[in-house]
Image: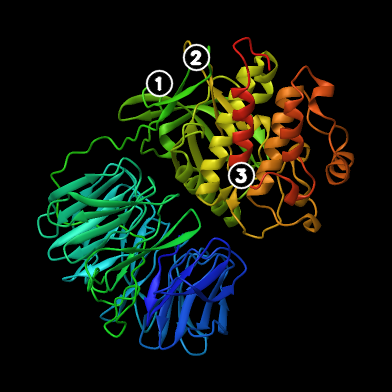
Amino acid sequence: MSSPTVVDGTVYFGSNDSNLYAVDAETGEQEWAFQTGAMVKTSPTVVGGVVYVGSNDSNLYALDSETGTQRWALQTGAMVKSSPTMAGDTVYFGSSDSAVYAVDATTGERKYTFQTEGAIESSPTVTDGTVYVGSDDAKLYAIDEEAGEQRWVFEAGLPVRGSPTVADDTVFVGSRDHHLYAVDAETGKQRGRFETDWHIAGSPTVMDGTVYISSIDSHLYAVDTDAGQQQWVLDTDFPVHSSPTVTDGMVYVGSNNSNLHAVDADTGEQQWAFRTDGRIDNSPTVVDGTVYVGCCDGTLYAIETGIADERSEGSRVMLGTLGHHDEWADRAIPPSSEVAVGESNTPNLGGEIIASTTRQSPDSGVTDDVADLLDDAVTRHSLSYADIEKRGELGRGGNADVFRATATTDHGSVDIALKQPRMGGGETLHTGVVERMMQEAETWQQLDDHDHIVGVVDYGSQPLPWIGMEYMNAGHLGQRAEAMSFEQKLWTAIATTEAVRHAHRRGVAHLDLKPENILFHSVENRWDAPKVADWGLSKHLLDHSKSVEGMSPQYAAPEQFDDEYGSTDDITDIYQLGAVFYELFTGRPPFEGQTFKVINKIQTETPAPPSRIADVPPALDEILLTALATEKGDRYESVLYLRDAFQQLRDDLDESGQL
């Protein structure tokens, strides 16, 4: 998720495996790697032989660019998702502890902090003595570069997570309220705005009088900077988180459809697309005709553009934002913001995205991707908490409650499921609770473009954190399993593994898979559609956190109780799926009893073969017991192999449903 930085023939980028890598730009060979304590989602800044990069372990690191040796580290109060910006001898960056930090680049000593009211993922832009930065408190701040004092503040409708771009005395910045704003750099007054159909996840690029922006509404926009009029729009069919890079008349941008798109900057016509094996969230960098881009499939790609001298160093305005310094010849461009200009005449299309769903055949169980299957297809709506009326409790788990609710939207009332933290009388929410639920919502929404993952309608943090979800009207797996045929159980297992595989390909492990988290939506004349819910304990793969708070012991893996069995990751999900499917096919979990006895059995015993407990084919024994292996190395190497094993078993069934 970290955009690559290319300096003096070396590509620097971070990874969800907690490392910052330095790679030879010509050969792709690793020069060195520096391991932090958690995911590295920020983009590195390289100045004067030093690499500055933030980590989710709450630190900003300064590393020697040639050797990867640490020079210093500054610890903040929370995750650092804001990429650092250098101005003079000072590094500026934000933290999830709601503060903007100004740090001496040589010593790592803090010069000052500026406190906001929300977590900061926006990377600061520093120009003409002012630091511009957005915050989750829905505000854009202008801060005096030297004194650290507020000059002005601009209020948007929802969090501002992207990096602002400054051009011609105008700050272009976007918000999760669907708008791209043009703000006077001196006064903070709005000059205009442009509305898209959904959140804007990428930073704006300004080039030759045009602002290029991407949106979660699956579009790339070109907008005139003076009039705020749309010049063209490209439909990618999938959400776009990547910030566009513009050079030599071409726009490069990644998409959730796993493609890197090359688009004519004047016409909006796609020239080519390069296919990867996962979604592309970060911004591409172009140096000497080569595009460097990272992908959620765990790969860094170097792609020839066919234009030998093409470079992206001027893709955004050279104003000190994330490598747009004149002295950084080969510096890459990261951010993650949004933009807008002038009053827009573009009509509001209602802010909707219809998620694809799945059609099932009652006689064969085969799935076909058909977007219009369910009468209640998942529709995104822009909601506030005041728009939601609770109807009754659906469930309780961990520290949160889920209610059936009705949401009032521009398109009428819709049924949703509302999740919010459980509170006692007079209780005040801890900042960590708010941050965890907002992180859950963001992660969940980035995954819910899959047919078998429960959709997120909207979410917010006021007056308390809440998540509005697709209302699943047909119970959960624990309630449904007994009435299913063996073939339907097989199909349900395949569909569920596909959902988990979708998350793994995007770098997320669920870690709390259980029957209650596999919900169903009724479908007329078809098998009801299973969907995976509750990503509250999910985490990015290879994040070494050992927290198991809220986990369900009967379906937990050995490594979730004792790190002697390794770290929790995607292979942990395979064990949990094995436990869930064991109960699906046999009617009981692999181990039963008091919690401490269950934990001991999970770590020391092998479950009884399913065919000894229930009337299931012996071929199922090997599948489930492999998934439930105590040692991680003995399980399936990927959830894909577990899916394939179920698929092969299903293919071996004859028309009567017997092997």
Residue 311 position, x and y percent, is 25, 72
Residue 641 position, x and y percent, is 62, 40
SS state under label 1: loop
Q: Quadrant of the N terminus?
A: bottom left
Q: Hey, what amino acid is under mark 3?
A: His
For marks 2 and 3 on the same chain, the one whose residue lies earlier in the sequence: 3
The reply, left or right, for residue 341 in relation to residue 403 is left
Residue 526's tag is 2
SS state under label 2: loop
Q: Hey, what amino acid is under mark 2?
A: Arg
Location of residue 267 with respect to 206 vertically, above or below: above
Residue 510's tag is 3
Label 3 crowd (10 A; few <14 / some 14-19 / many >=20)? many
Front residue of this view, candidates 267 and 220: 267
- The answer to whether marks 2 and 1 mark residues whose Cβ atoms lie closer than 8 Å is yes
SS state under label 3: loop
Quarter-of-image position of residue 620:
top right
Residue 373's tag is 1
**One can see residue 476 in this view:** no
